[in-house]
Image (cartoon, helix red, strand yellow):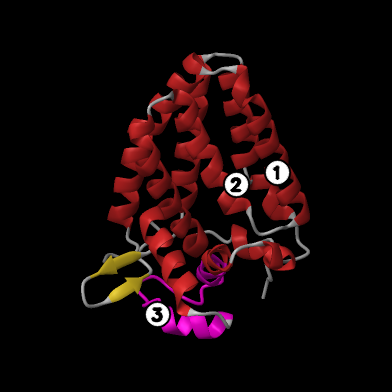
Amino acid sequence: AYTFAWRGYMSSQSAEETAYNEIINMIIMHQYPPGSAVVESQIAEKLCMSRTPVRNALKRLISDGLLDCTLNKGCSVPNLSRRDLDYLFDFRTLVEPACAREAAINYTPAYKDEIDSLIEEENTCLRSKAGELHIINEKMHTLTVTISGNNYFLHSVKQVTWRCQLYLFFFDNFYMSRGSENTSYLENFKSPSQHARLFTAIKDKNPDEAEAVMKEHIASTYNMLTQNKWYPQ
């Protein structure tokens, strides 16, 4: 099993942040498959912490789109299906390229350091096999919306990005293969170069290129996921 790198600096995090990251880690490692219940008391016992930070972490994960919450049933990992995947990517294809275009139009140098830092974080994370890549990915997509200036899309894009990452956790071998010595998976991993091209276009204030790269990025992720065999639900 692959142990993620954030464990080394847990002591500097709040209990809520630790619980938040650990629950994501458990999902990535398939300890909670789609449709399974995520029980507050069980998580607290596993992490040797009180239930309050776990409860707050679960609320964040529900808000972010990683977990569902239904009356009388509590939290669970969402059931994943081809239809749901199609709906998610329909939304992304409509909204995120438009946000990328507006980001290029509205970009100011005030965002340069944050962009450069995220690009460097992603490259470092990829080289070191650290466990934060999914968090960096979410930050990049929400930053694009922030730069666009249309904050009405922020929460929706964050939710959809996280929900799409559930499909990556369960239907793409990238996250699991990163724990092995075999680095061939890097050859087909296009996201870092696409992110770099996207933010270059945004900083160059080139809306056509920013929109085109975002469309390419979303389409390549969808195509990768739909190469897998799906069972109707």
Q: Amino acid at mark 1?
A: Glu
How many angstroms separate mark 3 from mark 1 (CA)? 32 Å
Query: Would residue 25 be counted in the magenta stretch?
Result: yes
The quarter holding residue 205 reads top right
Q: Amino acid at mark 3?
A: Val
Q: Earlier in the sequence, mark 2 or mark 1?
A: 1
Q: Quadrant of residue 2?
A: bottom right
User: What percent of the width, then of the height, locates residue 168?
Assistant: 50, 56
Per the image, the residue denoted by label 2 is 136
Q: CA distance from mark 2 to mark 1?
A: 7 Å
The mark nearer the N terminus, 3 or 1, is 3
Vertical placement of residue 232 versus 156, above or below: below
| Residue 193 on the magenta segment | no
Answer above or below: position of 191 versus 202. below
Pointer 2 or 3: first along the chain: 3
Residue 94: give x, y in percent of width and height.
33, 32
User: Label 3 near label 2: C-beta < 8 Å?
Assistant: no
Is any atom of residue 61 visible in this view? yes
The answer to whether mark 2 and mark 1 are in CB contact below 8 A is yes
Can residue 79 be seen here? The reply is no
Which numbered circle lies on residue 39? 3
For the magenta stretch, what is the residue range? Answer: 22-47
Dot 2 alpha-carbon crowd within 10 angstroms: few under 14, some 14 to 19, many 20 or more: some
Q: Quadrant of residue 174?
A: bottom right
Q: Percent from the top left, x then y, of residue 127?
A: 77, 50
Q: Using residue 61 as the reference point, say whether residue 49 is left or right of it.
A: right
Q: Residue at x 50, y 48 (%)?
A: 224
- Residue behind mark 1: 121
Question: Is residue 143 depicted above or below 42 in this figure?
Answer: above
Element carrying mark 2: helix
Q: Residue type at mark 2? A: Ile
